[in-house]
Amino acid sequence: MAKTKSVYVCTECGNDTPRWQGQCPSCREWNTMVEQIAQKGRSARVDKVGLAPGGAAPVRLRDVEGSEGQRWSSGLGEFDFVLGGGIVPGSVVLIGGEPGIGKSTILLQVAARLQASGRSTLYVSGEESALQVRLRADRLGGAAGDVLTLAETELETILLRAAEAAPQVLLVDSIQTVHTQELEGAPGNVGQVRECAARLQRYAKESGTAVFLVGHVTKGGGIAGPKTLEHIVDTVLYFEGASNQDHRVLRATKNRFGGVDEIGVFRMTPEGLVAVGNPSELFLGDRARGISGSAVVATMEGTRPLLVEVQALATRAPYGAPQRVSTGFDHKRLALLLAVLEKRAGIHFGQLDVFLNVVGGIRIVETAADVAVAAALASGVFDRPLPADAVFLGELGLGGELRSVGQVDRRLTEAARMGFRTAYLGRAPSNRPPAGLTVVEVNDVASLLARIFP
């Protein structure tokens, strides 16, 4: 019987130490060391770098043969768009998200469409039985009836059955339920997740099979397990969206075969997830006219322009310390904009509760929404609505100046397509604006508010 020992592994970087430490000596993160039972007698060289003596030899890049192969279409246009144009053979894709967000649903839909198009698939479920997967497929319309299904959690058995079936696409739901006999410990611990993901990656590269992994998320929103899991895979996708809303946003946070921050928008229906071809119309469909505190910004999600409504509400604080609450927008950025408005535009928020919301569950991370947020805040304080056909673009500097943002032409084109007639921004684009759209160039936030609220 093999002797075992305990090691402590960092959940952030994967570094291991023989003793527990409050701070990881490698990445310097605190309270990330967890205990793991590892087998004794394995080669240290294999454990550290995953190579054995007599492995691959280095070659010059000019001598590397082959070219980028043709991508496979999943049958879901929005899914292919987020991946960068389709599924790359031999790639490993990790999909994370909250429980019930739709991770298993979209993978089963992808498997059904790939099987129908002639691409052989193997759907491995470690959380549900084959009957449960069948019942979900029936609820989705029964299109996944020809998908090969395996209810298994042992990695060695999964790889054996995959070698026998030789699928072009392997889908594993989820990586936290898979375990290998080479390591002791329960499925889902740091060592098991890292080892199973590494071996599935090796299988994908050697066989050319595209592998999809479902990953659980922690209460902080990150994928459970070691951070090295996201470094191992080629693409990381996150499902976002509130459980009380029927639309979901699929976002790429890492992609070796395409752009990051690309999003795909889906609507959850009884027949599964349906792609939304016009996300701007979805997020602005319920927008009310003539209400103060509402502004529209043309934000960029990867290469896609997206029109989003920003709502602000400012009321007198009933208690001594006013509240600052933001949803979908960085609260530190909100505090900065409040300070700029108070200093440069003379709007005082010291006795006001401020609430900011990005409609539709979208997160805005770029600074191009500064001017829209400032206009919405001023509208909320004055209780006067902004022009309903106006869109706001630009970054707000500490001096109150409006700065230009990138890809203005694409943003303005999307605004004109959605019927907006005026765009307020810091600097007009060099190209001629789209037909029907008037560009208003404003130097600072005080001039902007004076022009909107004369």
Image (spheres, rainbow, N blue to C red):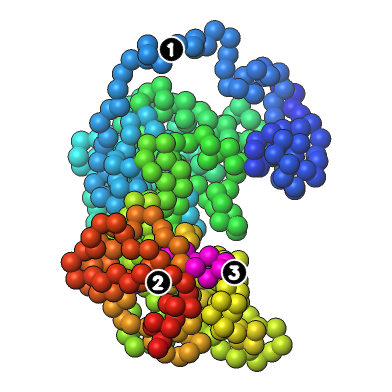
Choose between 75 and 313: the one closer to the eye: 313
Whether residues under marks 3 and 1 lie with C-beta atoms below 8 angstroms apart, the answer is no
Q: Residues within 10 Å of mark 2 (few under 14, many from 20)?
A: many
Q: Which residues are magenta?
A: 391-401
| Residue at the image point whose x is 41% and y is 25% from the top | 205
Mark number, residue 442: 2
User: What secondary structure is marked by label 3?
Assistant: helix
Q: Position of residue 110 (x, y in %)?
A: 30, 46
Q: Secondary structure at mark 2?
A: loop
Whether label 3 touches label 2, CB < 8 Å: no
Q: Amino acid at mark 1?
A: Arg
Query: Does residue 50 show up?
Result: yes
Q: What numbered label is drawn on residue 60?
A: 1
For the residue carrying disc 1, how many other residues have a C-alpha within 10 Å: few (<14), some (14-19), or many (20+)?
few
Point out which mark residue 441 bears. none
Q: Main secondary structure of the magenta part?
A: loop
Q: Secondary structure at mark 1?
A: loop
Q: Verify whether residue 149 appears in magenta.
A: no
Q: Residue at x 35, y 48 (%)?
A: 82
* Residue type at tag 3: Leu
- The picture places residue 201, in percent across and down from the top left corner, at 47, 30
Which tag, 2 or 1, sits closer to the chain's start?
1
In the depicted structure, whether residue 399 falls above or below residue 119: below
Label 3 – label 2 distance at C-alpha: 20 Å
Residue at image point 25% right, 57% down: 431
Q: Nearer the viewer, mark 3 or mark 1?
A: 3
Q: Earlier in the sequence, mark 3 or mark 2?
A: 3
Name the residue type under label 2: Val
**Which residue bears the numbered disc 3?**
336
